[in-house]
Image (cartoon, rainbow, N blue to C red):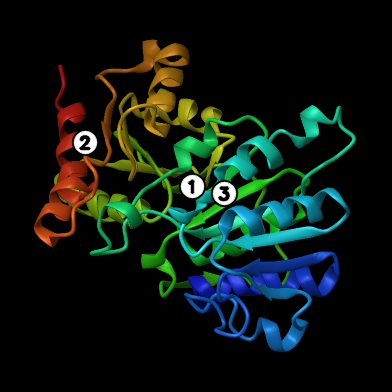
Amino acid sequence: MREIQFREALREAMNEEMRKDESIFLMGEEVAEYNGAYKVSQGMLDEFGAKRVIDTPIAELGFAGIAIGASMNGLRPIVEFMTFNFSLVAIDQIINGAAKMMSMSGGQYSCPIVFRGPTGNAGQLSSQHSQNFENWYANCPGLKVVIPSNPADAKGLLKAAIRDNDPVIFMESENMYGDKGQVPDGEYIIPLGVADIKRPGTDVTIVSFGKIIKLAYEAADLLAKEGINVEIIDLRTVRPIDFACIIESVKKTNRLVIVEEAWPLASISSEIAYHVQRYAFDHLDAPIERITNRDLPLPYAPTLIAEILPNVKRIVDAVKSVSYAK
């Protein structure tokens, strides 16, 4: 095991896969000469050359379309968006092209492509650069959507995504690129669609994913001091969702709190709440609670940002509300 940064784990995944398979290439804004906007691709141009690590213009619609065409013709592109906020410019290519290609061609064309980059709030970036679209992409059949929470998962999941024959949306957090964690030595793959119980518990289940898992840990530590034993499930993949893992946990704890950094309407938490009430209703001893962003565009002022995003206090209060429910 080695302790490395989140960005280094992503780089290792891409480097290892590109060394094995010459059909894999990376393209995006500033990925080559600048070594990546967040230094995820640092050194990759030197190793793989300009034909496999490709700087693009600021034209997400165009280079997403080029990558999709390449994937239909035997290549396996990795497309880096500088932020998934900018992926909205390319969403027609992703939804109406990549996601539907297998179905529309009757299985004649696959689209093995990874769209990756940062998502969500990363400080004072205001309304147009602080959004979460994982539920938008997870709504579309034909896509897989992955959101890792730590360096080890990031590497294992990205390798799985690169090898997958379906288009994968791989969402990271700008706030996590410098996070350090233990990463296994040698080859390993984490299968897509399998959740992970990060912290076993008996009293309340917290389900989350991505950087919000860190808030869940903090809340669980505070709750443990009050005698509330929390189980934390990291979804890792939000399409497909590992509902079986959640259901089995709820059957044990009888209480559920879902936390995500997204707007509340038609969110990942909405879908989870539906499935749990449908398939584990008799095991619930309290109503399901969920914590999301407030239903507002994210402002610039730090005080207002703090009021809108999920935080440790909101998680603690939600867990206590279901713990003491009659």
Q: Does the residue at mark 3 contact the one at mark 1 (Cβ under 8 Å)? A: yes
Q: Residues within 10 Å of mark 1 (few under 14, many from 20)?
A: some
Instruction: Reply above or below: 306 against 15.
Output: above
Q: CA distance from mark 1 to mark 2?
A: 35 Å
Three-letter amino acid code of the residue under disc 3: Ala
- Residue 90 appears in the rendering: yes
Q: Please give the residue where the numbered disc 3 appears in the rendered image.
A: 90
Q: Nearer the viewer, residue 116 or 17?
A: 116
In the rendering, at what x and y percent does residue 16 appear?
A: 74, 72
Q: Which mark is residue 61?
A: none
Q: Residue furthest left?
A: 303
- Between discs 1 and 2, the one toward the N terminus: 1
Q: Is residue 140 above or below residue 18?
A: above
Mark 3 to mark 1 CA distance (whole Å): 5 Å
Q: Residue 165, position in %: x, y?
A: 78, 46
| Label 3, label 2: how far apart the Cα atoms are | 39 Å
CB-based contact (under 8 Å), mark 3 and mark 2:
no
Mark 3 falls on what kind of element? Answer: helix
Which residue was labeled with disc 1? 88
Q: Residue at x 59, y 52 (%)?
A: 61
Q: Which residue is mark 2?
A: 319
Identified at 21% across, 40% down, the residue is 296
